[in-house]
Image (cartoon, helix red, strand yellow):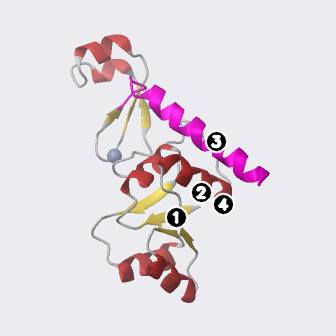
Amino acid sequence: MKFIADGMLGKLTRWLRMLGQDVKYSTQFEDEELIATAKKDHRVLLTRDAELYQRAIVRGIDAFYVDGRTEPERLAELAERFGFPLAIDLKRSRCPRCNSKIRSTPKEKLAGKVEKNTFIYYDEFWKCPKCGHIYWQGAHWGSIRATLEEAQRKVKVRSLV
Ligand SMILES: [Zn+2]
């Protein structure tokens, strides 16, 4: 499953990439470009624009209208519709910034490339081969997990309705 997201869905795009989903995104894409790329690459168009959604559907593009207001609501809708787990497996994660698959990187290779305290406190690091950004399960990891747990609860509630 591959996606392309409209320019209003930058935050959702980063979440989906962390969850391992392949999401093409640029704030520069015009509507026609979004539709053409979705068709050419067989990507599902994710959009908050009802008019764009209708145009895509009429032209036979697989599109999903993102209805939720918060990230947990949106993630729950998407997980339910497309059947992917709402859990981050860093072996499958993509770079939130550029969509490349991140790779586990030995700590010793990163000496001097991350802040000293980060280097001391953490042992596992991942690096994006394309943009070079380095990732670790830092202090923000708790809030990432809380957001995903909230999304999981919403999936459960939706399945009971
Ligand atoms: Zn990257």
Residue tagged 1? 66
Q: Does the magenta stretch include residue 155?
A: yes
Q: CB atoms at circles 3 and 2 under 8 Å apart?
A: no
Q: How far apart are marks 1 and 2 (CA)?
A: 8 Å
Residue tagged 4? 81
Q: Position of residue 3 (x, y in %)?
A: 50, 64
SS assignment for the magenta stretch, majority: helix
Residue placed at 46% from the left, 58% from the top? 23
Residue placed at 30% from the left, 38% from the top? 133
Q: Which of marks 1 and 2 is in front?
A: 1
Q: CB atoms at circles 4 and 2 under 8 Å apart?
A: yes
Q: CB atoms at circles 3 and 1 under 8 Å apart?
A: no
- Which region of the structure is painted magenta? 135-161
Dot 1 beta carbon under 8 Å from ligand 1: no
Q: How far apart are marks 3 and 4 (CA)?
A: 13 Å
Residue tagged 2? 78
Residue placed at 36% from the left, 41% from the top? 128
Amino acid type for the residue under numbered disc 3 = Gln
User: SS class of the residue under badge 4?
Assistant: helix
Q: CB atoms at circles 1 and 4 under 8 Å apart?
A: no
Q: How far apart are marks 4 and 2 (CA)?
A: 5 Å
Q: Which of 125 and 86 is in front in this view?
A: 86
Q: Is residue 141 magenta?
A: yes
Residue tagged 3? 152
Amino acid type for the residue under numbered disc 4 = Arg
Task: Indicate which disc, 3 or 1, sits on the residue closer to the N terminus.
Answer: 1
Structural crowding at the residue carrying mark 2, measured as other residues with C-alpha within 10 Å and reported as few (<14), some (14–19) or many (≥20): many
Amino acid type for the residue under numbered disc 1 = Val
Image quadrant in which you'd find residue 30: bottom left
Q: Decide if residue 136 is on the left or right side of residue 111.
A: right
Task: Indicate which disc, 1 or 4, sits on the residue closer to the N terminus.
Answer: 1
Q: Which of 2 and 160 is in front in this view?
A: 160
